[in-house]
Amino acid sequence: MTLQLARIAMRIGDDPRYIGTSEVLGAGSFGIVTLSYRPDGGGLWLRTAVKRISLRNVKSFSVTLQIVQLVARELTFLRRVGDSPYVVPLFDPWFDCVRRVIALPMDAGECSLEQYALRCRYRFPPLVLLSICVQCARAVEHVHRHGVLHRDVKPDNFVVNIVRTAVGTGGGGGGGNVNKNSSNSNRESSGGSGLGDAQSVLVRMVDFGLACSVEEVVQESKHWAGTPPYMAPEAFPDRDKVVTHSTACDVWSLGVMFFRLATGVFPVFQTGETWRSPPFDALYNGRLWMPAKNAFDEPISAESLAVMSIAASMLVIDTKERPTAEWVVQQLCRSLEDFRGEGPACSLGQGGRTATTQTVLSAENVRERAEDTAVRPPLLRDTEPLLPLRFFLL
């Protein structure tokens, strides 16, 4: 019945339209994501990621029902956010009765944003960093506008596609030139090439497995979810208060992600004479440390400074002073305009902040704060082990 409510077709064996491969794109407690190919007309094949959740080894009916309900929730939220150039679309799912596997097919990116940043060693081509941040912020703003909280915003949950032909304005953050079902960068032909000839980086959000609706915030107050280094302070459990889930949690996670993309390191807060690096549980006050150099001991570029200044405005501990995703999009678009020397790049309407007392730090303010910092804190770099990357406690 739950599968029927989720509109998952019952099928014997794999969907014959797909050609499966043994390449694993990702794995976790939910199952694995494998690469498949789906015909897209004209002799072209669409790279497709198939998320496979196996029920074969699940002996308990109650556990099986819980897994199916979580899958149904993910499908529900994906359909709720609707079509968007900033969210990876889901194709028709199915249930393999023979292997007892739920299959969720969707567009496959060339790599995750995490992998792309590591390949670039956080040295992005001009305007690409701002373009990536605009697209990520637009994705978060889009899901919030449709009443959905993602609750696991991080580079691993954004996929990157490289467009090797001129699209629109080149490296811009529009993203709307991509057909949601048949991105040119996902099509396989004999003339594929590497990342070196990339002209535009397109970014889209994936994985709504931990998402919840705004209406569920009160009901979900005893649950906590996310990836610890990216989680907002209020999202951690506390003996004296219930966990608070709101759109502000996603904005904090997005701020951590922007800070890391701009500097190559996670943000660090100074509380008294001590330094606090992620995770930020029990963080009630502190001053964000603004580095003058990136993870490779190089001066931070003007574009990275602009992104870091916006990230600093997002990493506000007081949720009432934290900006909305809409405000973040507006600030990033203005920065992109400044670096391009063009007119307005986006319009999202008026307002967009939870409070108006705090404005974004200018690049000059950020540089001054960075240069005034005499002591460097211990940095959490990519080479250091992180805490377990996914939590969902019921």
Image (spheres, rainbow, N blue to C red):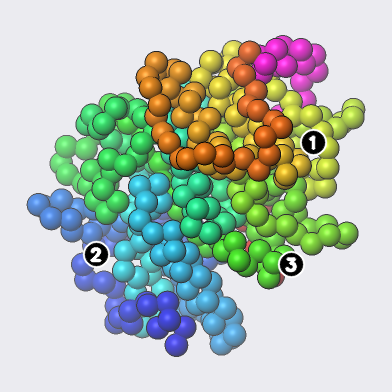
Task: Place residue 107 in its image quadrant.
Answer: bottom left
Task: Assess disc 3: are there few (<14), some (14-19) or many (≥20) residues with their C-alpha within 10 Å of its C-alpha.
Answer: some
Farthest residue to the front: give it.
350
Residue where numbered disc 2 is placed: 18
Residue at 59% from the left image edge and 61% from the top image edge: 214
Callout in the foreground (1, 3): 3
Q: Nearer the viewer, mark 1 or mark 2?
A: 1
Asked if residue 149 is among those painted magenta in the image, a careful observer would answer no
Position in image of residue 110 (x %, y %): 35, 43
Q: Which residue is mark 3?
A: 222
Q: Looking at the rendering, which quadrant does residue 89 occupy?
A: bottom left
Which quadrant, please, contains the N terminus? Answer: bottom left
Q: Is residue 110 visible?
A: yes
Give the number of the disc on residue 322. Answer: none
Q: Is residue 5 left or right of residue 43?
A: right
> Residue 370: where, in percent of width, then height?
70, 16
Q: Evaluate if marks 1 and 3 touch, with contact meaning CB atoms under 8 Å apart.
A: no
Q: Amino acid at mark 1?
A: Arg
- For badge 3, the amino acid type reads Lys
Question: Distance from label 1 to label 2 (Cα)?
Answer: 48 Å
Please tell me whether mark 3 or mark 2 is closer to you in this view.
3
Q: Nearer the viewer, residue 6 or 164?
A: 6
Residue range (magenta): 365-383
Q: Which element carries disc 2, helix, strand or loop?
A: loop
